[in-house]
Image (cartoon, rainbow, N blue to C red):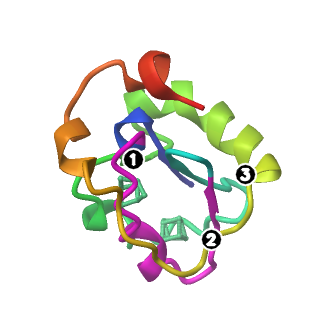
Amino acid sequence: PYVITEACIKCKYAYCLEVCPVDCFYEGENMLVINPYECIDCSACEPECPAEAIVPDTDMLAEKWLQLNQEYAEKWPNITRRKAAPADADSYNGESDKYNKYFS
Ligand code: SF4
Ligand code: F3S
């Protein structure tokens, strides 16, 4: 499966979910996660993210986020229609350590 990493936090552009054939995105307050059990590995979402937040689980970066995606996909509601990104999304794009600073 593919997973969403901390680059999504406070960017939440939400272009990713628009292309997903199985609607496996879940929405938290300031990021989205993918349910890795529902993702069919089609890779369509990866290039859609302007924050480059989406990686395959084979990526070195993914290890740390796979568990978080799994955990929160069970807690957060499914999101299937795009909402506009936060007005200040671009100012957080590329910032490091967003999980420790902003995750909620
Ligand atoms: Fe959905 Fe495909 Fe992305 Fe998996 S890889 S989350 S199935 S768009
Ligand atoms: Fe997040 Fe990128 Fe989707 S910022 S909401 S993973 S388009």
Q: What residue would you read off at disc 1?
A: 55
Amino acid marked by disc 1: Val
Magenta span covers which residues? Answer: 9-27
Residue drawn at point x = 48 percent, y = 46 percent: 4
| Dot 3 alpha-carbon crowd within 10 angstroms: few under 14, some 14 to 19, many 20 or more | many
* 21 is within the stretch colored magenta: yes
Query: Are circles 2 and 3 on residues that touch, CB within 8 Å?
Result: no
Q: Mainly helix, strand or loop, the magenta region?
A: loop
Amino acid marked by disc 3: Ala
| Dot 2 alpha-carbon crowd within 10 angstroms: few under 14, some 14 to 19, many 20 or more | some
* 41 is within the stretch colored magenta: no
| Dot 1 alpha-carbon crowd within 10 angstroms: few under 14, some 14 to 19, many 20 or more | many
* Quarter of the figure with the C terminus: top right
Does the image show residue 43?
no
Q: What residue would you read off at disc 3?
A: 73
* Quarter of the figure with the N terminus: bottom right
Query: Are circles 3 and 1 on residues that touch, CB within 8 Å?
Result: no
Between the C-alphas of marks 2 and 1, the distance is 19 Å
Element type where label 3 sits in the image? helix
